Amino acid sequence: MHEIELERQLKVLGNRRRLAILNLLRKRKDVNVSDIADAIKLSLTSTSRHLIMLERMGFVEKEQKSLNVYYRITSTPADTLRDVLKLL
């Protein structure tokens, strides 16, 4: 992995809210945005922003089910994420 890409990934992971989201997804697998926001005690807007960052880096994926959007850790997470998740 290139150093620049690793730096970008670590910056995304260097936020306690995003780490809390990943930890929640690690435990519960498939969670909608509203439940994530409630669990980490953050607004839907802020939670969505964090999820977008995690998705752009390839750490999570989403699925639209009716009116709800559900997130889960990608089926093949990056090595960086896999190592971080082991520490949670």
Image (cartoon, rainbow, N blue to C red):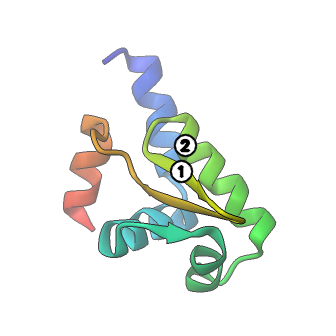
Q: Quadrant of residue 67?
A: bottom right
Which residue occupies the extreme top position in the image? 2
Give coordinates of residue 86: x percent, y percent.
19, 59
Which residue occupies the extreme front position in the image? 66
Q: Please determine whether, in this image, residue 58 is positioned above or below residue 82.
A: above
Q: Quadrant of the C terminus?
A: bottom left
Give coordinates of residue 75: x percent, y percent.
29, 44
> Residue at image x 80%, y 64%?
45
Q: Please determine whether, in this image, residue 87 is positioned above or below residue 74.
A: below
Residue carrying label 1: 62
Residue situated in front as seen by the camera: 3 or 88: 88
Q: Quadrant of the N terminus?
A: top left
Please tell me how crowded label 2 is: few (under 14), some (14-19), or many (20+) other residues with Cα within 10 Å: some
User: Which-is-in-front pick, marks 2 and 1?
Assistant: 1
Residue carrying label 2: 55
SS for callout 1: strand
Determine the CA span between mark 2 and mark 1: 8 Å
Residue type at mark 2 is Glu
Please tell me how crowded label 1 is: few (under 14), some (14-19), or many (20+) other residues with Cα within 10 Å: some
Q: Please determine whether, in this image, residue 6 is positioned above or below residue 14.
A: above
Q: How many marks?
A: 2
Q: Are marks 2 and 1 in contact (CB under 8 Å)?
A: yes
Residue situated in front as seen by the camera: 62 or 1: 62
Q: Quadrant of residue 3?
A: top left
Position of 62 with respect to 58 (left or right) is right
